[in-house]
Image: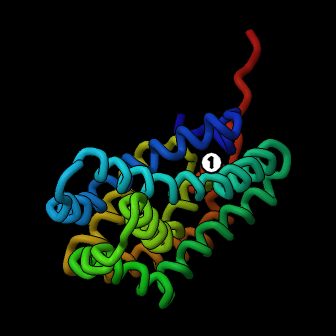
Amino acid sequence: MSGMTGTMGLGLVVFLSVWTLMMAAMMLPSVTPTASLYAKTVRGNRTLRIAGLTAGYLGAWAAAGLPAYGLAWLAGWLAGGQPSAARVLAAVLFAGCGVYQLSSLKDRCLAHCRSPLALLLHYGSYRGRFRDVRAGAHHGLFCLGCCWGLMVILVAVGLMNVAAMVGLAAVILIEKVFRWGPAAGRLAGVAALALAVAVFWFPWLAPGLHAPPMMPMT
């Protein structure tokens, strides 16, 4: 599965479903502290309200699946017949990740994700029937702002590359939870910039942008 390129032959609806499940699995460890604190503040209808929070959070990531689908489709098309252009796209994806990881916008989004108490105080001001959905979507957008640079790497290495998903989930968890998380995130950015250069000489670094060789007919 890790070597499959592009959208893996999936239609948009199925792709978005798979994408959302992948994001839920990858983000679960890092979002748990905030979700746990939020649950402790809920009074009455806890199950329904936590479901609303979850729906809002996953909705933000599901929406991100739309541009991801377009990018994956482009990657699959290039991998099938434009290997040189595919290599350039891989370099652009790695470089985009690296630059964003070192940017001030990334730092601001990460600061929000690393301060769950501040977020809870903000969410406490929300009112209305859909306040939990709104809180989940708000937090999901900040998580998206914090992590999208890392997620685009999946297009380069293969959307179903389990090793890459585990590695990226670990980086995201470290960034959000541990004291030295911001430094680890910047180190990941430097590594991505190095990959952007290296992929021109070692295209196997981007298996998601290189179609597997055809099996000989027997």
Q: Nearer the viewer, residue 195 or 5?
A: 5
Residue 184 visible in the displayed image:
no
Q: Residue furthest bottom?
A: 104
Identify which amino acid the numbered label 1 is placed on.
Gly
The residue wearing badge 1 is: 208
Q: Which colouring convention does the figure follow?
A: rainbow
Up-down relation of residue 165 to residue 4 (above or below): below
Up-down relation of residue 217 to residue 179 (above or below): above
Q: Is residue 6 left or right of residue 100?
A: right
Q: Nearer the viewer, residue 11 or 7?
A: 11
Residue 129 visible in the displayed image:
yes
Instruction: Identify which residue is drawn at 25% across, 60% down.
Output: 35
Secondary structure of residue under mark 1: helix
Q: Position of residue 204 (x, y in %)?
A: 60, 51
User: Which quarter shows the C terminus?
Assistant: top right
Q: Is residue 41 left or right of residue 98?
A: left
Q: Position of residue 61 (x, y in %)?
A: 51, 56
Which of the 4 image quarters holds residue 11?
Answer: top right
Badge 1: residue crowd in 10 Å (few <14, some 14–19, many ≥20) = many
Q: How many marks?
A: 1
Q: Nearer the viewer, residue 204 or 76?
A: 76
